[in-house]
Image (cartoon, helix red, strand yellow):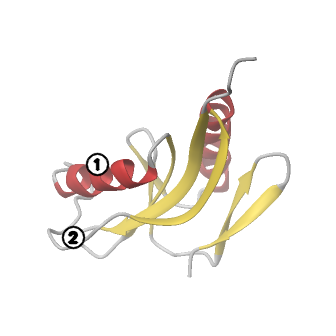
Amino acid sequence: MEKIEKEWLYVGYYRDINNNYVLKIGTTCDLKRRQQEHTRNYRKAVHNPAPHDETFHYIWTLPLSKWNTHRYEERNIRAWQELEIGEFVRNDRFVLQKIPATVPVKIRKTYQIALI
């Protein structure tokens, strides 16, 4: 029997140089490595760069199969765009002008992820 590869679906954020709350939903097989990559890359980002002393923070994580993480990431990005929770930047980030208390992440059930 073949072992099913697990990945993580996550929601995280950082504050940009203008102190905007930048929310992200994504997938990874290694949370620590991906957090370091986001911290490094968002400091160099053209749109909404993070200040030098800012790090990317996870708010919520859930282990799923590799195929499901990508499917649920795409579905939730579209749902967040429809809810207009913030300005969509690039492939996966939302710049929030007003920070809601929670954002929904729907898998089989809907999780309400607390932001503040």
Residue located 59% across and 47% down the image: 9
* Secondary-structure class at tag 1: helix
Image quarter where the C terminus lies is bottom right
Residue located 48% across and 61% down the image: 12
Count all numbered tags in the image, as a single digit.
2
The residue under label 1 is 37
Q: In which quarter of the image is residue 77?
A: top right
**Spatial distance from mark 2 to mark 1, Cα to Cα?**
18 Å
What is the residue that sits farthest to the right in this orientation?
109
Q: Where is residue 64 in the image (x, y as percent from the top left)?
A: 68, 41
Q: Is residue 28 left or right of residue 48?
A: right
Mark 2 or mark 1: whose residue is earlier in sequence: 2
What is the residue that sits farthest to the front in this orientation?
1
Residue 21 visible in image: yes
Neighbourhood count class around disc 2 (C-alpha, 10 Å): few under 14, some 14–19, many 20 upward: some
Neighbourhood count class around disc 1 (C-alpha, 10 Å): few under 14, some 14–19, many 20 upward: some
- The amino acid on which the numbered mark 1 sits, given as a three-letter code, is Glu
The residue under label 2 is 17
